[in-house]
Amino acid sequence: MARRIAIINQKGGCGKTTTTVNLGAHLTGLGKRVLLIDLDPQANLSMHVNIGVAGLNASVYNLLTGTEAVEEVVVRGLSCGMDVVPSHIDLAGAELELAGTVGRETILKERLDQFLAARPEAGPDPAYDFVLLDCPPSLGLLSINALTAAHEVFIPLQTEFFALQGMTKLLDVVQLVRLRLNRSLQIGGIIPCLFDPRTLLSREVLSEIQRHYGRQVFRSVIRKNVKLAEAPSHGRTILEYAPESHGAADYRALAREVLGLPPEEAAPETATPEPAEAVAAPRPAFADPAGDAPLPLGGETAARAEPAPAPGTPDQARV
Ligand SMILES: Nc1ncnc2c1ncn2[C@@H]1O[C@H](COP(=O)(O)OP(=O)(O)OP(=O)(O)O)[C@@H](O)[C@H]1O
Ligand SMILES: [Mg+2]
């Protein structure tokens, strides 16, 4: 069965789309089959993988508000190697249009269930290994649809001041969806993004995130990298655009962690690093699981390679 992961944070610009595209690209590079779903009216993900959104006949908007099936909307044959359900600016009106529709929170889940079940390859060996859902920077109906359709939640957090602001609200919403709409929803983990190892602030915020959320923070930290910022304007993933960059290395490490693979041996530095990245980012170990991790984060990524919990601290203690 495909792992369905919602990449969500209502905070804007924290790395959701960059993570969805480049985590997906590296999972593909590691031999996995990946479907991306763009749930943001800004359509940043669709443009990042070089889909001409202006000329689209159908998008996720038609999926949510009309009768189209995923099969009629999905874009295949992209250079990134992933299939994509694109977005469109029309999606901005979908929440209002659906305001009076009964069951509006579960439309995406139903369409996705039908699509995955109907594929001829479906069965014990599913057509996709991963479905990654890129959420908009809000906790409205589009995000609720993503959380209802997903099994796991990944939360990119920018390692800057105010990073943790809004986390309680986000976790409340995840908890509510879990209680009312999707019992199987789990928190897969927090992904520290846009980390700048040269600044004290970035390092302090990272250790605060790790102290607060402990084992629920991925060990892989995504550093600030200009190649990651440039890749979307070329319609390329980081794997296509700059496979030797730090950005590619960080997302490869994240993809391996998501798959439960051991970290790669650190290769000797061959290329001259960009000045802004001359300092290697630390690969922080998980904080003491018995430490301070009080928020209702739910479960953890089953496949994550991590130390065993300390005796007397079962996962449920932190649910
Ligand atoms: N690690 C990184 N290094 C450098 N630039 C980055 C990095 N991650 C993201 N960016 C850039 O930061 C900006 C915001 O990133 P992104 O679009 O992924 O965030 P987002 O959370 O999806 O934003 P939104 O909330 O608007 O959807 C983009 O211009 C992106 O190219
Ligand atoms: Mg985005």
Image (cartoon, grey):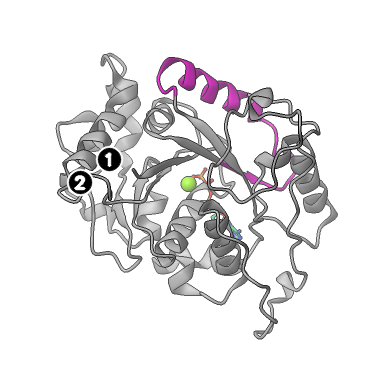
Cβ atoms under marks 2 and 1 closer than 8 Å: yes
Tell me the crowding category of disc 2: few under 14, some 14 to 19, or many 20 or more residues within 10 angstroms, Cα based.
Answer: many
Q: Position of residue 236 (x, y in %)?
A: 41, 67
Name the quarter where the C terminus is drawn: top right
Along the horizontal axis of the image, is 110 left or right of 298? left
Mark 1 is on which residue type? Val
Q: Total of numbered circles in the picture?
A: 2
Label 1 SS: helix
Q: Mark 2 — residue?
A: 73
Measuring 48% from the left and 21% from the top, which residue is drawn there? Answer: 178
Along the horizontal axis of the image, is 178 left or right of 246? left
Measuring 76% from the left and 28% from the top, which residue is drawn there? Answer: 312
Q: Is residue 177 above or below residue 26?
A: above
Label 2 SS: helix
Instruction: Looking at the picture, tell me which residue is in the foreground, 289 or 152.
Output: 289
Q: Mark 1 — residue?
A: 60
Q: Is residue 177 magenta?
A: yes
CA–CA distance between discs 2 and 1? 7 Å
Tell me the crowding category of disc 1: few under 14, some 14 to 19, or many 20 or more residues within 10 angstroms, Cα based.
Answer: many
Bounds of the magenta span? 155-183
Mark 2 is on which residue type? Val
